[in-house]
Amino acid sequence: MPPDKAPGLGRILVSETQISEAISHLSSEIARDYDLSTLILVGVMDGAVPFLADLMRTFDQSVIVTTARIRSYYGTTGGQLIIDSLPLRDRIEGRHVLIVEDILDSGATCELFTRKLTEMGALSVKICALLDKPSRRIHNVKADYFGFEIPDTFVVGYGLDFDGKYRNLRNIHVLVR
Ligand code: IMP
Ligand code: MG
């Protein structure tokens, strides 16, 4: 990108209203498929913050909720994942885990995390991603639950960032480069 032209905020791709409708729908599916007393929601920080907060509050009975922090670091030789924090093992053992992610892109994060959670004794591990970019998938993972399939375009807002910016926005926008 030319130094004088920083990427900026483009049009709304998914609106606040669409997000909230999708979350209601996801919530019904999850409540239908699980005994919620055996479930733990694990939000991947920092991107899943608003999604996790909105999704968890749709359930009217207790659901265990925790977080993990996994960063992608893109060096000159490609991507590498760094796990900064994992959930407590005694929370995961013997529970059904639902990974709550902002977006499923190459699938690297969810593949690694699924493996870790299984090693930690999860009864099952499934993925709930608000957004899915199936055309970008490299790893053999799928979103068991997803809100929206989107094309191969970089998006920001509602937890999604570019260089740490825009996470706070209520709508999801295209990033214009
Ligand atoms: P994956 O490991 O390639 O599936 O990518 C996972 C992470 O990359 C997501 O959790 C996001 O943090 C980030 N990511 C992928 N696509 C986008 C995007 O369009 N906007 C912002 N972050 C993204
Ligand atoms: Mg993420």
Image: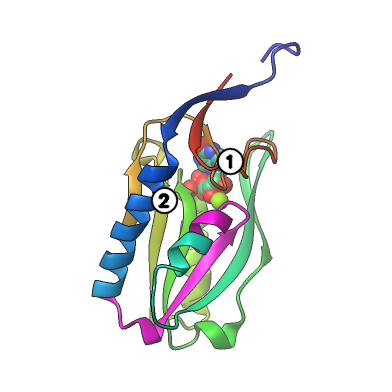
Residue named by callout 2: 130
- Of pointers 2 and 1, the one earlier in the residue sequence: 2
Q: Residue at x 61, y 66 (%)?
A: 68
What range is drawn magenta here?
A: 33-52
Q: Nearer the viewer, residue 166 or 42?
A: 166
Residue furthest to the right: 3
Tell me, what colour scheme is on the image? rainbow
Q: Residue at x 35, y 35 (%)?
A: 135
Residue 60 relative to residue 156: left or right = left
Q: Secondary structure at mark 2?
A: strand
Give the numbered dot on residue 169. Answer: 1
Q: Amino acid at mark 1?
A: Leu
Depicted 54 relative to depicted 93: above or below? above
Q: Nearer the viewer, residue 28 or 164?
A: 28
Depicted 47 relative to depicted 137: above or below? below
Q: Count neighbours of disc 1 (C-alpha within 10 A) and say few if under 14, some if 14 to 19, many if 20 or more.
A: some
